[in-house]
Amino acid sequence: MATDKLGLDFTASLPETVQAFNEAMDDYMLFSGEPVGKLLTIAEIDPDFAMGYCLTGCLRLFGGVSSVHPRINLELRAAKARRSRVTLREQAHIDAFEMAAGGELCAAGQMWDAILTEFPHDMMAAKCAHEAYYLVGETVRMRQSVQNILPAWDDSIPYYGFLLGMGAFGLEEAGDYRKAEDMGRRAVEIEPHDCWAVHAVAHVLQMEERFDEGIDWLESTNRNWDGATWLRGHLWWHQCLPLIENGKIDRVIQIFDDHISDCDQDMVTRLNDCTSLLWRLELKGIDVEDRWDRLVDMWSVDIIDHAFAVAGAHLAMTLVSAGGEKKLGRFLESQHAYIEGENNTNSEIIETIGRDLCLGLIAYRRAEYDKAASLMAPVKDQIYRIGGSNAQRNLFQLTLQAAVEKVAH
């Protein structure tokens, strides 16, 4: 038996497992380092470390890896093989991971919340619930998940500042901008490297159209988050949104080339940012030259994956913009097969919302504006269910609005 930095017991056979788990959780909070690598290195030699496989699998899922990916299946099987000899808390984590891997992220989030009722300091459960709700647009649950456990925390407990950052984002997505900004700024005061808290405040400033403040906020905190490998591109994306509004297009292009497009094919959330920014620029009438070409190559490995509807929408935008008609056809065929072959909440969201959204975006890029509007308008009030943030999903509203305007003229 081992004890993590929050005082929670977990099953392990080797003394070095504790350090590996704590370091991986630190990386997870900071969106930096290689938490998956650290966990797998120790899990492969510690026969009792079920939590290593459990967290690794969850990190892959939250990063946009499809639940049908062989690594997810391997890690789930490895965690379940150890289930009978770990604590009840760890068993509950394994069960929640299995639920998430089955395409039921909201249900998985509720299972992590159930863990928190007994273990409110379980930051792994809190973070996993937060991410699960975020990825399926469960804004109210995301906000409440943190609010329920905050009374049990204070600044003497490790990760307290990070919990405030998560709370701030949940409040922002629920539209409580004043509380969100106050909590986010407090989180950054406690932990300047908390890029998720920086992100929450950036969201508030964007949603309230405080564009100059948003630019200043990200510039003033940049030195603390630019090392966050897994989130820095998204924060640069946030920097670009107010710059676009202020007409600083040359600066936006420079940021895209230097800080956003420098990702690889495994960073699905970063690829979303690349696609979103290029599409936004084109909505403004900006020529993005050949930037779609490199992007389509990085997205290509995800054509038959359908991890989340929001990623599918961005993939469709990329393929149609780059002229990848054969790949686009394969994607749509694969999407249809996924809908027909799966029976879970994720497939239901893709069937009822994601597919028409993809087809509408494709029609818009082909200048079929009436078709685009007729496909996107009926699902616009349900688009929140595809996951992502209000700021990210705003792109689809902007596209629908553009389509309607073009039809009218």
Image (cartoon, grey):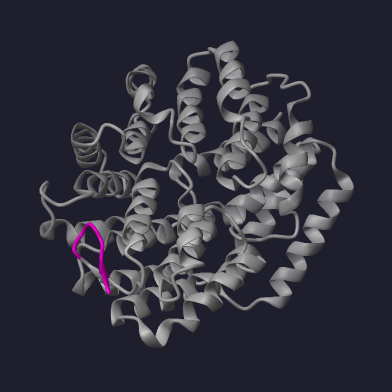
Q: x%, y% of residue 10?
A: 30, 72
Q: Is residue 391 visible?
A: yes
223 is higher (above) or lower (below) than 148: above
Q: Residue at x 35, y 81 (%)?
A: 86
Magenta residues, start to end: 1-7
Image quarter of residue 54: bottom left
On whether residue 379 falls in the magenta region, the answer is no
| Residue at far right of view | 326
Q: Number of marks in the image?
A: 0
Side of 378 relative to 366 (left or right): left
On whether residue 2 falls in the magenta region, the answer is yes
Side of 229 relative to 303 (left or right): left
Side of 2 relative to 288 (left or right): left
Q: x%, y% of residue 235?
A: 45, 31
Side of 282 relative to 83 (left or right): right
Q: Residue at x 44, y 81 (%)?
A: 82
Query: Majority secondary structure of the magenta segment?
Result: loop
283 is higher (above) or lower (below) than 215: below
Front-most of residues 248 and 193 = 193
Quarter of the C terminus within the rendering: top right
Q: x%, y% of residue 258?
A: 59, 21
Quarter of the N terminus within the rendering: bottom left
Front-most of residues 31 and 406 = 31
Q: Residue at x 60, y 47 (%)?
A: 268
Q: Is residue 385 visible?
A: no
Q: x%, y% of residue 9?
A: 24, 71
Q: Residue at x 58, y 58 (%)?
A: 308
